[in-house]
Image: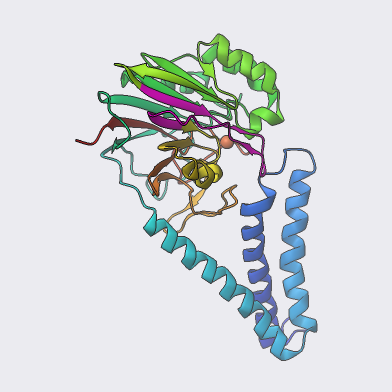
Amino acid sequence: MILGFQPSLLGMALGSAFVGGLVFLVLVNQRFLVIRDSRFKMPVLVVSLLTLTGGGFFLALVLPPLWRIGLPLAILAGILAGECQRLFRRRAWAGSPPVDTVFHDVPFLKPVTTTDLVCHRYTVAFPDWKGPPFRLVHLSDFHVHPAFDEGYYRRVLDRAATFEADFAFFTGDYVTRAESIPILERILRPVAKRGDFAVLGNHDHWSDPARIQTVVERAGIRMLMQRSETLLLEGQPIHVIGCDYAGYAKIYIPPVPEAPGLKLALCHTPDGIFELSRKGVDAVFSGHNHAGQARVPGLGAVIVPSRYGRLFDHGHFVIGKTHLFVSSGVGAATPPMRFYCQPDIFVVDVTGVD
Ligand SMILES: [Fe+2]
């Protein structure tokens, strides 16, 4: 007897509480993390966790023996089936690994990786591109925060500039809270030779979107909010499409140009990938997921604020003809720390197909 419970009953109750915790993780990933930041968000998360784990524990005590075993097993089987589906899809949609990564192995005993920036380089050939090779640099999720040394953000931008990219894409979440906007104003600058483009992320919408838009544009970066621009590179058109993401399911995708040319979309969340792919976009550049921000060695990201859970946590994917790039981002949201999860920038060299 332990605390008045039969050991077998206590074991089943703890098992049911564990399954409740797994259900919480599934719900957090797909529903709760993308609701608007407020003083209620953390209490909602805590109450949900306690309800699901405590509920699982309680149900195991009161349900008949068959249900006590069958219900958590059925839920566990459903979660495992979802995980198998995710692994299958990741394999089917896997893109190419980086052709080069300025990589720092994260020692197991050094879990805090908050400013341990890496750069991933990719080379992609697009059948729709008839022009000369060019280079993109992709930066996301600065989450400029007073807890960080301002010099860190400047070093990231300096590093991005060293690649001498033709175009730079900034995919949102410049700050976590409005009080950091003056820091953003001090550090932000363009880094590409021919043009820098930006969209907002959900945290920008939850703080002060109009002011952030002004700061970004004053820095010399063109904001594409639900609109597209067509650039010409040696006479060949590149359509840059700016989506807007205000959190949860609010992804606003502007009309995609039907004219010939390469179609590149900036969309803070990768959750717009299937609609953008259906609309014929060649590549989508996203952030938002922070690669989980805290990763478990051997397991990867656990909590990812996406309707697809951990499916598109980070990296390069190919869905149909559409390439999806999901950056880990430069900064970190609440709490402003990363664990076994490095910040990154992507450099993508674009060519046509001979
Ligand atoms: Fe973010």
Residue 293 visible, this orientation: no
* Image coords of residue 82 (percent x, y): 54, 66
Magenta stretch bounds? 237-264
Q: Quadrant of ligand 1?
A: top right
Q: In the image, is 347 to the left or to the right of 308?
A: left
> At 75% across and 61% down in the image, what residue appears?
50
Question: Farthest residue toward the front?
Answer: 259
In the foreground, 27 or 13: 27
Query: Residue at 43% across / 31% down in the picture?
Result: 264
Q: In which quadrant of the rendered image does the N terminus lie? A: bottom right
Residue 292 position, x and y percent, is: 52, 47
What is the basis of the colouring in this image? rainbow
Q: On the picture, is 317 further left or further right than 44?
A: left
Give the vertical position of 137 relative to 59 (above or below): above
Q: Is residue 259 magenta?
A: yes
The answer to which image quadrant residue 103 occupies is: top left
x and y percentages locating residue 320 in the rendered image: 40, 49
The residue positioned 46% from the left and 26% from the top of the image is 240
| Above or below 172: residue 334 | below
Q: Quadrant of the C terminus?
A: top left
- In the image, taking residue 351 as reference, residue 294 lies left or right, namely right
Q: Is residue 84 magenta?
A: no
Can see residue 41?
yes
Q: Residue 322's spot in the image, x, y percent?
A: 40, 43
- Left or right of residue 105, residue 42 in this image: right
Q: How many marks?
A: 0
Judge by depth and name the residue closer to the eye, 292 or 315.
315
- As displayed, is residue 72 above or below residue 107? below
